[in-house]
Image (cartoon, grey):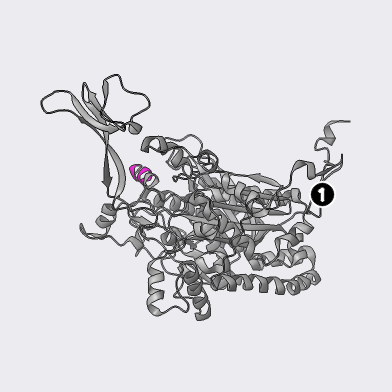
Amino acid sequence: MSRLPLIVGFGGVNAAGRSSAHHAYRRLVIDDIEEIKRERTFASLAALMQRGQPCSDNERRSMLQHTLIRKLEKNLFDSESILLQKTAELSEPSGKQTSFVIKKIQLPSTIPDTWIVDTVSEVEVKVTVSNQLKVLLPDARISKVHAAGQLPTGFDPEALYQSRNHPRGLQLTIFGASDAINSLGIDWEQVKNIVPGDQISVYASSAMGQLDTHGSGGLLQSSLVGKRVSSKNVALGLAEMTADFINAYILGNVGTTGANVGACATFLYNLRQGIQDIRSGKYRVSIIGASEAPLTPEIIEGYRTMGALAEDDALRKIEGTTIGDPDYRRACRPFGNNCGFTLAEASQFVILFDDELAMELGANIYGSVADVFVSADGFKKSIPGPGIGNYITVGKAMGVIKSILGEEALRSRSYMSAHGTGTPQNRTTESHIFSQLAGAFGIEKWPITAIKSYVGHSIACASGDQLASIIGTWADGIIPGIKTIDHVAHDVFTDNLEFLLEHRAILPEGMDAAFINSKGFGGNNATAAILSPKITRVMLEKKHGKTSMVKHTKMNESVRQASLDYDDSMLAGENSVIYKYGDGVIEGNQLKLSKSNIKIPGQKHGISLNIPNPYSDMID
């Protein structure tokens, strides 16, 4: 019998705030939600941003101003004065030899052949150069891009645990994965008492690796700026470290692990691995996620020179002005008159249980994953350019919802969370995909939204941001609109589509499915089909029966309360980050080994070595 991958926990952080308990989602629709929810979300932001409680009106306005897309702030780097070095050649005006005095300890280890070195004192020497002297002069530049989806001002993940100079992306991993696990409402030890360690999988990564000075950035920069390479630079710079940190410092996981990378579709690549694990029946729990911290001067400049980012001058041109700051809040304009995407940082995680485990533990049910489809583009003219693969993934995702729920549900009870980057190329290519396929499936007005307009493009995490928003929509009944544009651009395909330029109130039980679309550099296309909590419960009742559903509902009361208790503790400013450095380390000589089992100290279930023959039909 098939196993359904249920979303039972989620957490993380992005420019809108903490994801668990729907707070990041509610920041997007803050003016449209009921007062009690609005109060809790402001309290969540206040705790995250280290503001006082209760919040005054001025504090609230300030928190709103210092969340979502905005002008890049100086806590990461000063975008008005980015350090660089400029090459120059020094020479005497008369054309004679150039000379200078320098401390002995500052001499290069290899003296150039054109240098003559004479001792001046015990600590200094005089260097005479027989030709022009090539030097690097300190300089600074002003960034041409100032808009960013920066984490809420005042949130400092490094201060929450003994970070030991971890790259920022891994700091976000520790916070995001901890938030997801704590949001479960079920103690992780209880999960481990039921599920053997080799039936838990973790799939998480970044798309670009850790490129700040504590990761690969420092590895490449150090020798050029007169510093030494750290022993941590290589290891901590790897994209797979996102999963490795969860295994080693949060869960103590001995199950399957992996780091799937697919550019902007990375989160969905990992999600696909997790649902395949659970549907196979070999795994019962899968933790899926991604973390990305790309707000560094070098990465921003790299994307800018590609012509991918919304530069200040281009934003001013759209706004019809040449002076002053553009409206950074509206820098990302999916499907409108736009000029590029807005880079962002984020960390997002979801926890999947198989349906039997979720029923047994009374787990929260936020929805389920029908499927995730991935396709390449085929032959391409350029690596960054779009291709045909996304037509396939969107079409298949629509097809699976039609198969599960029927044509009417697809036509009238689904919506699309678009990739919606805010680039001129994306607005035409992605809208054409949606328009053509909506027509093919008989959809007349398919609702389309794009939350990058609020939180920016967090590369690997982008689809995780979208999923957290979809989960929130089913909780509160509001689809966030694309409020950074007044109208769709003239070259956007609109047949069979309805681009939501305002928030759309819905009945959660009337929206059966949602789609997440992702288009990545290199032809990494992915589309996920997500089933609503209502539909998920209908499927569970059909499989397990009404009596089991009543039992689950009763058990879920304590789980929901535990989830609420965790949220209350976070609102109160408690630090719930999980970081078990050096805790519970087990050496090989502590294992109990037999030909049928490996027993790990502290774990109730051993690891079975009785592996079925997968090729029994091919051998006698």
Q: Position of 471 compared to 85: left or right? A: right
Seen from the viewer's position, the closer of residues 100 and 375 is: 100
- Where does residue 506 sit, x and y in percent of width and height? 53, 72
Residue at far top of view: 113
The image quarter in which residue 362 lies: bottom right
Query: Which residues fall within the magenta stretch?
Result: 301-305
- Dot 1 falls on a residue whose secondary structure is loop
- Where does residue 338 sit, x and y in percent of width and height? 34, 55
Majority SS type along the magenta span: helix
Q: Position of 488 compared to 182: left or right? A: left
Q: Which residue is mark 1?
A: 606
Q: Is residue 441 among what the camera can see?
A: no
Q: Is residue 278 among what the camera can see?
A: yes
Residue at far right of view: 620
Q: Position of 255 compared to 326: left or right? A: right
Mark 1 crowd level (few <14, some 14–19, many ≥20, 10 Å Cα)? some
Seen from the viewer's position, the closer of residues 309 and 212 is: 212
